[in-house]
Amino acid sequence: MASPGPHPSCSLRPKRALRTVEPLIAVAGLGAVAYLVGRLFRRFVPEIVVFLIFGVVIGPEGPLGLLDEQAIASLELVTLVALAVIIFRLGERLRLSALTGLWGRLVPLNVAQLLGTGALVFAATSLAGADPRLALVLAIIGAETGVLTVTAVVKEERADGSFTDLLLASVGVTNAAVAVLFGLAFPFVLAATGEAGTTLETVGVFGRMVVASTLIGLVAGWLLERFGADIETSGELLLFLLIVLTGVAGLATAVDGSVVVAALVTGVYVSNRVPWLSSRYFEAVQTLEAPIYLVFFVVAGAGIHLDALRTVGAVGMAYAVARLIGKLGGSALGSALDGQGSTFREGARMGAALLPHAGMAVALVAFVAEQSPDLGQGVAAVVLGGIVVFELSGPLFTRRALRNSGEAGRDEPGRSRVEVPELAAPHGFQRVLVPVGALRIVLPRMPFLLDVVASFQATLVAVHISRPGSDEAEIDEPEVLTVVRELAAERGVPCVTVHRVSEHIGEQLAAVADEESVDLIVMGEPARRALLEPKRWGAVAQRVTEAVDIPVLVYPVDPSDPDDVPYPRLRRTDVQEQASSGDGDEGA
């Protein structure tokens, strides 16, 4: 009897696995080659141009054809998260405190280049035969700048300085403005085509593109602010950030919103709300930039449709030429009118650096095609043709602009961007205010507190605040102040005791600090001991810090475990036993 043939499932599994692995093998192998070639030719062209070309070579229309459309689609999730990560990091350059000196140049420059590019693209494509609705959509998308391309060139060139700061801030402002303008205008375009029959549908497009994306970004920023401070290691912090940004990309895609807007809002929120924490996030994600750029641009190159150049016709040519003139001329005009002494030449250089065209433009094309298939065909042919031109040539313009600005190579590893100022002469603290509450809590900490005051050779100002109606309210010097004064005398520390009765502890501490002319406050605050425990730290310390203009040193206190002290030394057993017999009022 003939042996049975292989089970169908046995023959199919290896093939399915092979088809699944092939795209990854292709990207890994060609990515390695692209990296090596990019390193060899980086003197002549930016690395990302090499990555894009390799992507074209292995793409569906390339000579090798290693990646088909299905494989590219399977990698879109990776590129979507990569896009969110890089856009998030752009928030580092949009910190309001850092932009204070740039507003005078940033606003006129970007108003002029956005309006100039949009107006020229609309006029040129209309004259070339485009329908007004198509021309309006092209005008808005044409104003976009490829944020990933620009940031990749800046990183490769190690550029740093005022021109680079203005460039990256302009990229963020440009993309945010394009998203808002598209969200405002496209609903009316849909209404004009009859594809948005109701007002609700028209408003819904704006809601998804701008409002929903902004809300997603704000919620993500709050999550990063709320839980990031409790993460100690950079590895865990990076993992948490990637989880949040993956959620941002997924939610923005699910609601047909903008990943760029959502991720940008997240970065701007964290950068401005918690600058110290955002610096940790940006440093953690910086280690992923090189592989992100490689994967993103190789896959982006594979998705470039070269046949789009053959179908754009007069409208496509008008789009490309008008966008080029609009970016250069608009930026030159805006710089000349900024009142900061900028010249047309400097503005034109900025416009050249803003020429790359991808990222959000691709997302907007896909959005238009989904909402209006007829309109989407015309938009896709023209914009994708422009992307081919500007993504291959744009990095060259950006690199040349950075080099001509003199800022390429200035971002040296380990170099501080802030010049070290001359320090003032040393000044010791003369009077140190220490709030003291319940004896059982303050006693174990007295060695630590006295050491702090003694190290400055200062006078201790011990303050106890009793609650109104308590037994201590009528006593001139409660027991806790007496004990503190005796311990200070034993250590040779001058001591002044102050007793107040009030419900407003922070307000009274600030008042005593002013009356006693103290120049340092050292105080304890209840500390959170578990991740899910509500935050208690800072309730009083925050009020004191806001009310005084002197330093406040805060140390953690756990009232449930008074013996857990930061500096457990020199305890007095006799006084401790005395305290255990009567704790008295908790006080401050």
Image (spheres, helix red, strand yellow):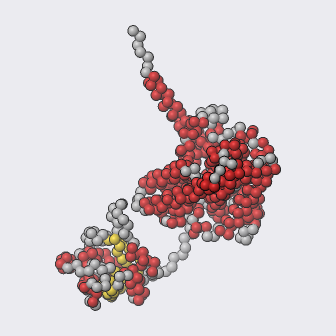
Question: Is 81 left, or right, of 373 in this rendering?
Answer: left
Q: What residue do we see at 54% from left, 75% from top?
A: 422
Q: Is residue 49 visible?
A: no
Q: In which quarter of the image is the N terminus?
A: top left
Q: What residue do we see at 18% from left, 78% from top?
A: 581
Q: Is residue 251 visible?
A: yes
Placement of 114 over or under 549, stated as above or below: above
Q: In which quarter of the image is residue 41?
A: top right
Q: Viewer-proximal residue, 304 or 394? A: 304
* Residue 515 coordinates in the image, percent (x, y): 41, 89
Q: Quadrant of the C terminus?
A: bottom left
Q: Viewer-proximal residue, 105 or 405? A: 105
* Residue 131 coordinates in the image, percent (x, y): 76, 48
* Residue 480 coordinates in the image, percent (x, y): 26, 83
Q: Viewer-proximal residue, 158 or 554? A: 554
Placement of 413 over or under 7, stated as above or below: below
Q: Quadrant of residue 479?
A: bottom left
* Residue 564 coordinates in the image, percent (x, y): 27, 69
Placement of 160 over or under 246, stated as above or below: below
Outermost residue toward the front in this view: 198
Q: What residue do we see at 38% from left, 81% from top?
A: 504
Outermost residue toward the top in this view: 1
Q: Viewer-proximal residue, 257 or 360? A: 257
Q: What residue do we see at 34% from left, 68% from top?
A: 527
